[in-house]
């Protein structure tokens, strides 16, 4: 998983709880410190169809995929019209963070007929921390 889920959204800096790490006392972090290049990401607030809004931080190609889904709206994205090497992986990562994304299977013709996926964002998504806190 490339991003961190931070819950719940708040309007105050430093009050969100990072749920990607163990909360147990005396638990050692066995992974080494990542370089600065890997420790940053893009913050989004997610409003699911049911439940409370929360914020996530995504990095790598996941923010690109989330932006493509936001821009596409109800029409959704397909790997045919929005080429990327690993759409299914980006969607998997975002779903693991709690973003609701529907997969619609569609047939296609051509030299290699078959089916492809259309991904449609079902959660409300806004860029940045709710309340403007960073």
Image (cartoon, rainbow, N blue to C red):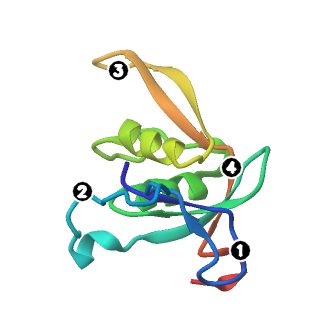
Q: Is residue 121 left or right of residue 63?
A: right
- Residue identified by numbered label 1: 10
Instruction: Tell me the distance, in whole angstroms, between the alpha carbons under discs 1 and 3.
Output: 49 Å
Residue 30 image label: 2
On residue 53, which mark appears?
none
- The CA distance from mark 2 to mark 4 is 34 Å
The secondary element bearing badge 4 is classed as: loop
Which mark is in front, 1 or 3?
Answer: 1
Residue 55 at what x, y percent from top left? Answer: 61, 64
Rendering coords of residue 10 (x, y %): 71, 74
Residue 9: x and y in percent read 68, 68
Q: CA distance from mark 2 to mark 3?
A: 50 Å
Decide which of tag 1 and tag 2 comes sooner along the chain.
1
Give the side of residue 105 with respect to residue 63, left or right. Answer: right
User: From what the image shows, is residue 122 above or below residue 107?
Assistant: below
Which one is closest to the eye, mark 2 or mark 3?
2
Give the residue drawn at x 54%, y 38%. Answer: 119
Q: Earlier in the sequence, mark 2 or mark 3?
A: 2
**Which one is in front in this view, the residue at disc 3 or the one at disc 4?**
4
Query: Where residue 123 is drawn, which disc sits there?
Result: 4
Give SS at disc 3.
loop
Dot 2: few (<14), some (14–19), or many (≥20) neighbours within 10 Å? few
Residue 116 drawn at (x, y percent): 43, 25
């Amino acid at each position: 998983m490339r991003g961190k889920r931070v819950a719940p959204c708040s309007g105050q800096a430093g009050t969100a709880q990072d749920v990607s790490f163990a909360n147990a006392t005396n638990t050692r972090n066995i992974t080494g410190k990542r370089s600065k290049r890997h420790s940053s990401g893009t913050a989004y607030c997610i409003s699911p169809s049911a439940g409370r809004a929360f914020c996530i931080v995504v990095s790598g190609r996941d923010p690109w995929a989330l932006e493509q889904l936001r821009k596409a709206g109800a029409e959704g994205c397909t790997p045919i019209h929005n080429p990327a090497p690993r759409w299914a992986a980006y969607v998997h990562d975002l779903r693991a963070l709690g973003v609701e994304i529907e997969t619609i299977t569609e047939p296609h013709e051509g030299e290699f007929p078959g089916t492809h996926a259309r991904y449609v964002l079902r959660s409300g998504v806004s860029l940045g921390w709710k309340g403007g806190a960073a």
